[in-house]
């Protein structure tokens, strides 16, 4: 289970297919379901009634995003996004 509360923001490190890209999964009151996105891939997102369903749809969307980018000559960016929690300054 990815979280206990439907309103809790979720972050997932998942499987080989997407291990390099950060994934956000969060509950949307407006959509009454979960949204999953990859911040490094512009407009790459998916919807599901559960966190797992949103993640499964995101795997499909990621593949389509990368195929479309390659087909049109668009650069596929390397993973760079890191949430603020991982960007805390080092005490010195």
Image (cartoon, helix red, strand yellow):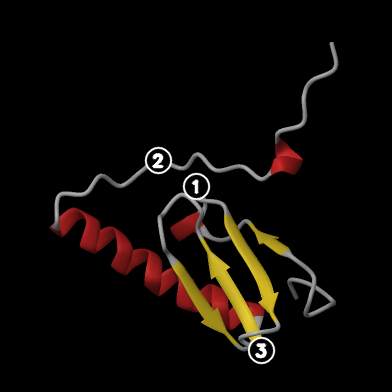
Image point (77%, 31%), residue name: 88
Residue 12, image x and y in percent? Answer: 65, 60
Position of residue 65 in the picture relative to residue 31 (left or right): left
Vertical placement of residue 68 versus 29, above or below: above
Q: Nearer the viewer, mark 2 or mark 1?
A: 2
The residue under label 3 is 32
Res. 44 image quadrant: bottom left
The quarter of the picture where the N terminus appears is bottom right
Picture residue at 46% right of the left edge, 49% below the top? 40
Residue holding disc 2: 78
Residue 52 is situated, as x and y percent measured from the top left of the image, at 61, 79
What is the distance, in whole Å, between disc 2 and disc 1 at their CAs?
Answer: 8 Å
The correct choice, above or below, for 68 with respect to 27 in the image is above
Q: Which residue is mark 1?
A: 20
Disc 2, disc 1: CB below 8 Å? yes
Depth check: give the residue in front, 84 or 11: 84
At mark 1, the secondary structure is: loop
Mark 1 vs 3, N-terminal side: 1
Cα separation between marks 1 and 3 = 28 Å
Count of numbered circles on the image: 3
- Residue at left 25%, top 44%? 75
């Amino acid at each position: 289970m990815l979280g206990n509360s439907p309103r809790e923001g979720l972050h997932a490190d998942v499987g080989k297919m997407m291990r390099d890209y950060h994934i956000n999964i969060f509950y949307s009151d407006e959509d009454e379901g979960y949204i999953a996105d990859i911040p490094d891939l512009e407009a790459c997102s998916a919807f599901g009634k559960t966190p797992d369903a949103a993640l499964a749809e995101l795997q499909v969307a990621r593949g389509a995003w990368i195929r479309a980018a390659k087909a049109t000559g668009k650069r596929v960016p390397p993973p760079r996004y890191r949430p603020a929690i991982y960007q805390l300054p080092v005490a010195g």
